[in-house]
Amino acid sequence: MMMEIKTIMVIGAGQMGGGIAQVCAAAGYTVYLNDLKQEYIDKGLARIENNLSKQVSKERITQDDLNGTMDRLKPTTDIHDAKHVDIVIEAAVENMEVKGNLFSRLDEIAPEHTILATNTSSLPITEIAAVTKRPEKVIGMHFMNPVPVMKLVEIIRGLATTDESYQAVEKLAVDLGKTAVEVNDFPGFVSNRILMPMINEAIYTVYEGVSSPEDIDSVMKLGMNHPMGPLTLADFIGLDTCLYIMETLQEGFGDDKYRPCPLLRKYVKAGWLGRKTGRGFYQYQ
Ligand code: CAA
Ligand code: NAD
């Protein structure tokens, strides 16, 4: 019998966690939104309210819809609130140690039936599952940025993930208005195995002085009809996340073709992480 999901905890109120919490609450779920500090949650909630207000002004939703969605969001800095939920969707930083610690704590706190999902961009689901005593209930639920707009959710099965867990997560994705695609657990899954080497190659193209960031982006926007050029997209995703993903691909496949561009490393070391820090390949106010 498929389990029914009613309450959700989202871990991390950053650009992805905030978006995931928004679409879950808008679809009628009760959502605990967790981050390390109250100020991070407040920032996330302000971004959600701002997104919803734009929808109200475009008459896509009513003020009552907005109020209802905001009411269903329960801010919490206490991870023990995981004891109230049917699924946890983790969207903290792309770092194995952080995710490993979170999943072993969640495994102790959450009820037995609770599914533990991760929005990781590239880290192995099977390895994250291995720190828990419920690997059959650990799964990748990979949303795309910006979450309220992008239709895809990649659902990644770890080695031990059961059909029951898969079906519950697929039903949730469909309920959120998304299209689910099933993927097996290999580095970068499908999305980032294909997307990130293109972004990394665009960075090499800057590094080698082939062209300017603006012109490289124009080539891909106007020549290939991409909605954003690869460097604008890298800034949008976050250069730290791009670097973590390239490192995972390089380590996972052991192939030099995934070597992160030294310029990407340099920007991340400088704290130029893209839009979220105001500077990456471009400057933002
Ligand atoms: N949050 C919520 N809504 C947003 C948004 C955001 N950050 N940015 C844009 N929108 C909404 C706008 O409000 C607008 O909504 P309406 O149609 O209701 O008016 C709609 O999106 C279109 O926005 P704009 O007209 O302002 O701009 P646009 O047409 O250029 O679209 C975009 C913006 C949707 C982001 C588009 O540029 C795009 O598709 N870019 C590529 C995004 C992409 O490739 N994402 C995947 C990244 S990879 C990933 O996520 C995986 C990973 O692991 C790294
Ligand atoms: P972000 O930096 O915007 O947000 C991460 C948030 O997690 C921060 O608010 C941080 O304070 C919080 N956090 C860190 N450790 C925590 C912990 N132990 N407990 C609770 N909260 C914690 O990052 P993001 O872009 O939202 O990425 C989050 C995850 O989503 C990463 O795994 C990333 O790979 C993945 N992802 C990112 C994108 C993207 O385009 N940026 C797309 C798909 C998936």
Image (tube, rainbow, N blue to C red):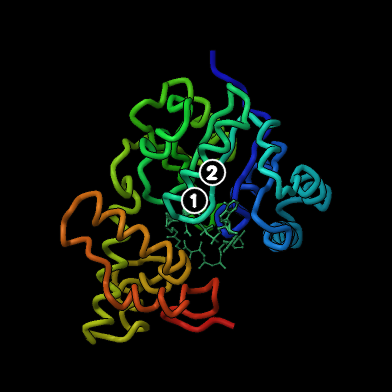
Residue at mark 1: C-beta within 8 A of ligand 2: yes
Q: Which residue is mark 2?
A: 102
Give the residue displayed 58% in from the left and 22% down from the top.
Answer: 113
- Left or right, 54 with respect to 122, comes to right
Residue type at numbered disc 2: Leu
Residue 28 showing in the rendered view: no
Give the residue displayed 75% in from the left and 62% down from the top.
Answer: 57
Query: Considering the numbered disc 2 on the image, is that residue within a helix, a strand or a loop?
Result: helix
Instruction: Identify the disc placed on residue 98.
Output: 1
Q: Which residue occupies the foreground of this view, 145 or 277? A: 277
Residue 61: image location, x then y, percent? 74, 51
Dots 2 and 1: beta carbons under 8 Å?
Answer: yes
Give the residue displayed 22% in from the left and 61% down from the top.
Answer: 258
Task: Write down the quadrant of residue 78 in the picture.
Answer: top right
Q: Which residue occupies the foreground of this view, 13 or 36? A: 36
Give the residue displayed 40% in from the left and 26% down from the top.
Answer: 161
Rendered view: 254 above or below 1: below
